[in-house]
Amino acid sequence: MTTSLLRIRDVKTYKRQSIIGQNRCGLVASVSMGARQLKKRSNLRLVICSFLGLTALTLGISSASQANGDFVLLDGGTFTMGSNEHYREEAIERQVTVSPFQIKKTEVTNAEFRAFVEATGYVTTAERDLDPSENPSLPKDLLRAGSMVFAQPPGKVDLTDFRVWWRYVPGADWQHPEGPDSSIENMDDHPVVQISPEDARAYAKWAGGRLPTEAEWEFAARGGIEGAEYTWGDGYDPGQGWKANTWQGLFPSVDTKEDGHHGTAPVGSFPPNAYGLYDMAGNVWEHVSDWWVPGHPEIATTDPDGPPEILAASFSHPSVGAMNVVKGGSWLCAPSYCLRYRPAARQHAERSLGTNHIGFRMVKDALSR
Ligand SMILES: [Ca+2]
Ligand SMILES: [Ca+2]
């Protein structure tokens, strides 16, 4: 049995032999892209937005919310998680129940992350050189501290090769999100980026919380709206007002920024969802705690925390290791290429690597006040 087929079998097992809407070719493509990433460090990175979405089919949520400073207390409840109608990694829809929890109203900002760094001396993964002895096959340039940066191409490009618009940039980190010559001056209220899952967990622990599970995040993003495709309901007519920081124009070469922002926007620049949460759609993708596999199990469950690490690792090259889920889409999501500013949408991120379109928010247990 080939490795790819073995991984397909693993997913089938994970989904309890219910591969509704799944396609072997798609799974193989996903695995193959992971292997191809090995060629250069600049290729070991987040695979974003690979297939165009279609229509929505969503179901129900019921909960209540209560504001609590920077956090909203959600009562929890049962909802339909995932989608069978969009990208294949969002299937299978299933009934999920989450217990009460508190979630931050906004993405964590540069100012908030700076307070953490100043208090602790924390050094992010993007600011650390890699150990040559642990990465003997990598060229020197790729051992230098840095991160992934979106590089807007000047013209039309091959949309099947994300490497055209992503670059590994030495010196890129949370204070220099586009490289050593960039800065976050006057961007205190923007979401912090170039943050890896490892960094996000460290911040959350320091701040008295944790990363949300994917189920908690998606429950919160849906805002209690029964069966909605988006965080605000079904359908999206920007003529009625922009609802999220996304990409307008021909991705990835032209962003007409009709929503007012190219790149990140200050958190809270767009209307909140019905739970009072901002930017659950777009602005920056958000790290959650679950390991990534390209799909959901079918069975109903309570407070799921994702697949086991060993299964997630089977969908990534050994040098990358198991990857984490990111949710919500970003300023780089264009409907023509990546309709992922939706609650069910999901992608993956390496555990020790950030980009300039991924951030995070944190949650706290319901009893933590
Ligand atoms: Ca925008
Ligand atoms: Ca977001």
Image (spheres, helix red, strand yellow):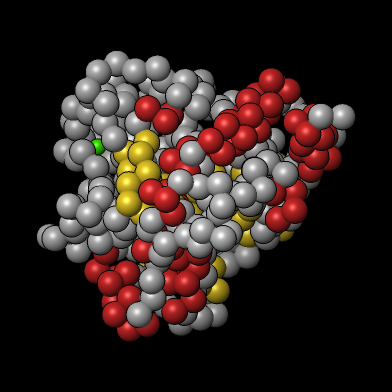
Q: Give the image location of residue 168, x and y in percent.
A: 37, 44
Q: Residue at x 38, y 56 (%)?
A: 144
- Asked whether 220 or 142 is in front, the reply is 142
Query: Measured from the top left, where is residue 243 in percent x and y?
Result: 29, 39
Can residue 247 be seen here? The reply is: yes
User: Going 19% across and 58% down the picture, which residue do you hit?
Assistant: 184
In this view of the protein, which residue sits in the foreground, 70 or 6?
6
Q: Give percent across and percent down for residue 29.
A: 63, 25
Q: How many marks?
A: 0
Outermost right residue:
1
Report if residue 79 is visible in the image.
Answer: no
> Where is 364 relative to 166, above or below?
below
Q: Residue at x 31, y 26 (%)?
A: 252
Seen in the picture, residue 69 relative to 308 is either above or below; the reply is below
Q: Quadrant of the N terminus?
A: top right
Q: Residue 95's x, y, as percent? A: 69, 46
Residue at 16%, 38% in the rendered image: 260
The answer to whether residue 242 is left or right of residue 363 is: left
Q: In terms of depth relative to the viewer, which is nearer, 18 or 331?
A: 331
- Please state if 96 lies on the left or on the right of 252 as rendered: right
Q: Quadrant of residue 84?
A: top right
Picture quadrant of residue 152: top left
In this view, 234 is above or below 321:
above
